[in-house]
Amino acid sequence: MHFDIDPDVTRARTLPKRFYLDDEAWALARERIFAPCWQWLGHLGDVATAGSLSPRTLLPGLLDEPLLLARDGAHTLRCLSNVCTHRGNLLVHEASQGVSGIRCGYHSRRFDLSGRLTFMPGFEGACNFPSASDHLPEVAFGAWQGHGFASLAPARPLAELLGPLEARLAGTGLADRTGGIASWAHEPGRDREFEFDAHWALYVENYLEGLHIPFVHPGLSQAIDMADYRYELFPGCNLQLALARPGEAAFAPAAAGTADAGLRVAAYYFWVWPNLMLNLYPWGLSVNLVLPLSPSRTRVLFRSHVRDASLLGAGAGGALDPVEQEDEAVVLTVQRGIRARLYDRGRYSPQHERGVHQFHRLIAAAMAGPAVASTV
């Protein structure tokens, strides 16, 4: 399926509306955009010790692939299929610690924590058993600052995808593993989930530009300096840098000689292809994962990891629920509007919508075929 997005943002037109409305486009996006990409699996706190197991689901509601994080006695953490290789039974249903192996509750097939088959009753005399296909498949896995990521067929290493983010945060001290993101505490009491009737890409597009902030988010626009709102693009991800107005909460000054030296940063809004937002505020990290459910239904997960509880409620990250409700309201009206016979596609603001343009070019490349999805 071909979508033509001019690489020159000053000339380009946005995705045609059929991407959001066409059932064939939806099915193709599932396989060409989401199946190969890296997906956030959550915090790794429950698999910190040897002999730990934690079931996860890769992209719930769309891919729904059952996965299992397993840390063996040598402290190696792997991501395995959570499906028994005998008859497809789900293996592990809840996190556990202090285990030495994995046992299927259906026919008692057993695996070690590397996924290797170790025991199977009733298969005496079976030819060529066990074979490689009897072991649990291992899925590409990576960790970043205490968070896990998996991919069924990654086009690039996770470290390469998140490299610009890691490099940017190094000068701020936020990536320091002794006191940075890896040590920030997940607070389940602040978790949120929102569902609404709109296409997932419309929600991502709204996130990727600050042009709408003064018109849709009156509270947020009072906390950040829209006159100096900044955008930076990297392969497979981008950054929106929001500076704080005088008197509003801001990060401690970055080290001299770094990209943000001398700036009062209110928020780092990092987007990672195709559906992950990593929002850093002075109080901590808000992870937003966009889950496509249908062409006109989306769920968004919010997960908070707090570094300084005294700053909760202040600055750009101080009132996330009202901002989310404002975003949902406008995305819902866009979902209705793109169905109009008199609308097909629009143009980009060269100053404010370069991130949206990058997103659309990545979509166009992925939909054309997986071999070119990582080249934009």
Image (cartoon, rainbow, N blue to C red):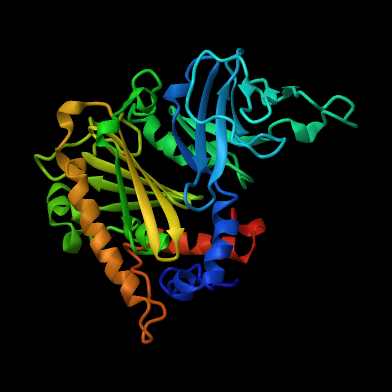
Name the residue at 21% across, 47% down. Answer: 321
Residue 206 picture quarter: bottom left
Q: Position of residue 248 (x, y in %)?
A: 12, 40
Q: Quadrant of the C terminus?
A: bottom right
Instruction: List the single residue furthest toward the left.
Output: 247
Residue located 26% across and 42% down the image: 267
Residue in the image at 90% along x and 32% along y? 127
On the image, the x and y values in percent for residue 362 come to: 52, 59
Of 53 and 286, nearer the camera is 53
Instruction: Confirm whether residue 271 shows in the render.
Output: yes
Residue 131: % across, % down: 82, 31
Q: Residue furthest bottom?
A: 342
Q: Nearer the viewer, residue 5 or 123?
A: 123
Q: Is residue 277 above or below residue 188?
A: below
Name the foreground residue: 358 vs 104. Answer: 104
Q: Quadrant of the N terminus?
A: bottom right
Q: Quick check: 254 above or below 299?
A: above
| Picture quadrant of residue 351 | bottom left
Q: From where the camera sits, is residue 354 visible?
A: no
User: On the picture, is 288 further left or further right than 78?
Assistant: left
Give the side of residue 94 with respect to residue 27, left or right.
Answer: left
Q: Is residue 5 above or below residue 43?
A: below
Q: Nearer the viewer, residue 135 or 175?
A: 135
Residue 138 x %, y %: 66, 33
Report the residue at 32% width, 25% height from top. Answer: 184
How many numbered marks are there? Answer: 0
